[in-house]
Every structure is written in structure tokens, then in C-alpha cells.
Amino acid sequence: MSKQTSAGRPSGPPRRVGGKPGRAGGRDSSRAGSPESRPTGGRPTAVDPARGVAYETLRAVTERDAYANLILPGLLRRARLRGRDAGLATELAYGALRGRGSYDAIIAAGTDRPIAEIDPAVLDALRLGVHQLLHMRVPPHAAVSTTVDLVRSVAGPGASRFANAVLRRVGERDETEWMERVAPDASKNPDGNLSVRYSHPEWIVRSLRDALRGSGRPADELPALLASHNARPSVAAAALPGLSDVAELTDGEHAQPGVLSPVAAILKGAPDDVPAVRQGRARVQDEGSQLVALGAAAASTVGPDRGRWLDLCAGPGGKAALLAALLAERHAAGLVGDDAELVAVESAEHRAGLVQQSLAAVQCAYDVRVRDGRTVGEAEPGRYDRVLVDVPCTGLGALRRRPEARWRRTPSDLTSLAPLQRELLESALAAVRPGGVVAYATCSPHPAETRMVVDDVLRGRDDVERLDTPAVLRDLIGSRRLPGTEDLYLGDGPAVQLWTHLHGTDSMYLSLLRLKA
Ligand SMILES: C[S@@+](CC[C@H](N)C(=O)[O-])C[C@H]1O[C@@H](n2cnc3c(N)ncnc32)[C@H](O)[C@@H]1O
């Protein structure tokens, strides 16, 4: 994992905490950090607001299965944190969640107790402390003392002594030295080694190796791919065509042009600082997702596209908004008729509400429907010119944005979602008219959710052609390139797999298909 500078913190390499404490977590102190030592988990009182918010985020994720990206904005608002302080709280929370696998191995090496026996409220605070010590330019004494204060406020003085001993021990080494000590021997246990070094569960390490191999990439790219999930992602926005443009977003201090997507800008600060984002004319959206929606709209149909478009898995509505804006543009240009409409289907009611909100600014006819997408093909056979089916998946391609996701997913998710993914694609193919386009997308690079689903559904069918997806995306991307790269790797087709470590986007998969006319 690369070192990151925390906003508003003095810079310079982390120093070691002085002294040489004995093995932390000797009998008494380790009992102080154990769940039975005293009731814990109140709101932290003795820490600065940014650390308090980060800690509450970790607790909500650990205790209530909350999603960090959903809980954090409300906590920041409640604590009135903005700018650098909000950046610090976000870095602390996201960094500690992402680094959990590595940090727990280090914490375990500093105590006599197994991790499972440490009070979870204390363990979350320790993870925050270790992240500051090893990964941020927080002076070690500040990392230790703020964490110890935090533990005292939520778990009492015994636990704070335990935390102090553990963190002083952690501070004796830098991250590289710790990894040499705690990661399994790479020659005997390569997956275990990568798992601890890059803080991913072992099954995800194996799955991502399979994913690289399955799409023709060398397996020795795996460390770079794993590392890319631990880097802080840039925040991209899509300028919705007809409502905003990249020139507007990049006019001033707030953003610079995106890397691969023609409608992208990279935001430098809070999205709400940008008027077009505030007004719904631009939306925060990864560039890979932008390319998927743009590609779905750009692929050629046989016969005129009348503008009957369907988004079969629309929530929360990022791609639907981009599709709707493109459709509105075509309507304004007279390319589609007055009956052009985007139908957005979503099975979860609350997510359909988010789709409704995402479409509010767009000047095109749309219809948001709460229903099971698997039934649409049968109900409306051959009705649509274009169908995007962005199926529910493990999200293994977007781990950098969902810091807790890697610890929540299980290996069985890879296979358990496949029947649903297949049925949704079958429904999409039934809903499209002859000559119309279906775009199958996932934010996972694993073959079980990508190529194998498409292959399974198309097996035995001769009425569907696979379009040259790399060619469609090449046209959209034009001469744009990731800084420092000349080539644009999009593979040999017919589908495209984007990769975080190669493209700087989420690892999105897109397969463009056309029903034969
Ligand atoms: C990967 S997300 C789609 C993301 C969306 N396209 C966007 O860009 O914002 C998949 C969505 O499919 C929804 N979903 C799951 N099962 C479904 C079904 N049977 N029919 C329709 N939607 C479904 C999920 O609730 C989730 O919102």
C-alpha cells in the first residue's frame, strides 16, 4: 500500500515511537482490551471531531453492517466537518477499513491475545491508530495519544493502557518491516503472503488472479491490481450531455479534465462545491461506468434507433442519468421521435427512488418502474432499441470505493449470483427488437460473472452477434490516455475488461451484443 499524506497534517516520514515496551497485552492489559472487561462502544468524547467521525464510521460498519460511503456523509454533516477536516476523517475511516487485514495481523503480533478476543470497540480504535502510525504522516506521538484517549473515552482506563502498549509496539517498525515479520512466507504460501501484504481476503486474491488470467492478462500483475484497491481513488464526475460539459466543470479551481471518458472531469474538492453537480447537471461517477453507458448508447443498431431505451437494473441511477441525457440530446437533434423514452427498471423500491432523483434534471421522457427485471422480456418482447443490463454482482471491480466490501463478500457470492445474472441477460435479449443492442455490464472482472454468463446465455443461440466492444470504446476514448501510457489496452474483444491498475477506472466489464435483424 502506498503512503498517503493526510490533509492538514504535518508532513515528513513517520518516526518510531520511542522506548521499547515489553510485549504488549501481557495478562492484565490484554484483559483490559477484552470484551468482558467492561461495557464499551459509547460515542467518543475525548478526541478531535475528525477522529471521532472516523471511529463512529468503523463502529457502524463493524456493529451494524453499515456501508461506509452511506454513513460517513451524515456523520460529517452532523460534526460540521468540511474541507481538510472532512478529508482527514474520510482518509482515516477508509484507510483503516481497507487496511484491516494487514493491520489486524500487525496488532495480533503485538499482543498475547487472538484478535477475536479483543473488544471490537477497542480493536476498531487500534486499527485507526495503526493506520495513522504506518500509513499517514501523523506524528507517532499524536497517533498514539489520540487513539489512547479515544479508547479511554469509550472503554475505560484499563483498555487505554492496553491500547497504549500495543501501539507503542507497532510504532517500533515501519510497514515494510512489519510485513516482513507478519506476512506468510511467499515461497510457501504466496496467496497468504499477498493477502496480508495487500489486505485482501485470500479467496479474493485467488479470484482476482483467475480474473486476470481469464481475460488474458499476466498473473504477475496481481500485486499491482491489489495495490490499486488500496489507493485513494480520484473522484470523477460525468457532465451530463446537453446540461453541462467538461469545459464548464473544469472552468476554475474545482476540477481537471478526466482521463478516458469524453464527458469526465476529475474533481479536486467536495463534489457539492461544483455548481453543476449541486444542480444535478453533472454526477459523480467513475469513468469506467461512464464508458459503459456511453458505449451502450454508441453501439450501432441495424435499422433506425427510435429511442426506446431500457435500463434493466437501474438503481441507483448513475448510468440511467447519462443514458437519459444522451437520449434527450438525440431528441433535440431530431434523431429520435417524440415517443423516445428511457424506461428504468429497478427491483428495490428505495433504489428506484434514487433513480428518480438522478433523472430529475434531465429533459427526456422517462419512466422509473419498480419491478423484477427478469419479467420484462416476457412482458414486452422486442420493444426496445437498446437495453443496458448492469447486473448485480460481487463488486470485485470496485473494491477501492467500497472499503468494507472485501470483508463482507464471501466466495459463494461469485456463483450464487450467476443464475440471476443469466436470467437478467435473457430478459434483456427478449426485450430488445431484432437489430437492437444489448449491453451486458458488471463491476466485477471475474469470469464467473462476466464472460461465462454471456457464453452460457448465448450457447446454442445463433440469433445474437457479439459486437466489437473495444472498437466502440476506442472511438469514444479517442486519443485520451492515462498519464504515462501511450497504448490503450482494451484487449482483443469481443468484450472489454477495464482494470483499475491499467486504466485507473473501476474494473468494469462490457459486452455489446446485437440481436440479428
Ligand atoms: C450494479 S447495480 C446497477 C447500477 C446502476 N446501473 C447505476 O449505474 O447506477 C445493480 C442493480 O440491480 C438491482 N437488481 C437486483 N436484482 C434485480 C432484478 N431482479 N431486477 C431489477 N433490478 C435488480 C439492484 O437492486 C441494483 O440496484
Image (cartoon, helix red, strand yellow):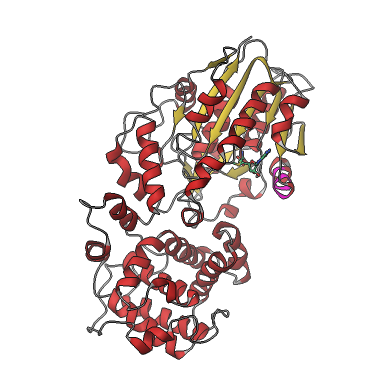
Which residue is rendered at x = 48% and y = 22% of the image?
A: 469
User: Is residue 10 something that shows in the picture?
Assistant: no
Which residue is rendered at x = 51% and y = 46% of the image?
A: 412
Classify residue 222 by image quadrant.
top left
**Quarter of the rendering occupied by the C terminus:** top right
Q: Position of residue 171 (x, y in %)?
A: 28, 75
Q: Is residue 190 left or right of residue 394?
A: left
Seen from the viewer's position, the closer of residues 68 and 251 is 68
Classify residue 224 by image quadrant.
top left
Q: Position of residue 182 (x, y in %)?
A: 27, 64
Q: Position of residue 472 (x, y in %)?
A: 49, 22
Q: Position of residue 306 (x, y in %)?
A: 72, 17
Q: Which residues are magenta?
A: 350-355
Seen from the viewer's position, the closer of residues 284 and 300 is 300
Which residue is rendered at x = 40% and y = 64% of the image?
A: 6
Look at the image and say whether residue 179 sits in the magenta stretch: no
Look at the image and say whether residue 354 sits in the magenta stretch: yes
Q: Is residue 272 left or right of residue 162?
A: right
Q: Is residue 263 left or right of residue 13?
A: right
Judged from the image, the quadrant occupied by ligand 1 is top right
Seen from the viewer's position, the closer of residues 472 and 515 is 515
Determine the main secondary structure of the stretch shown in magenta: helix
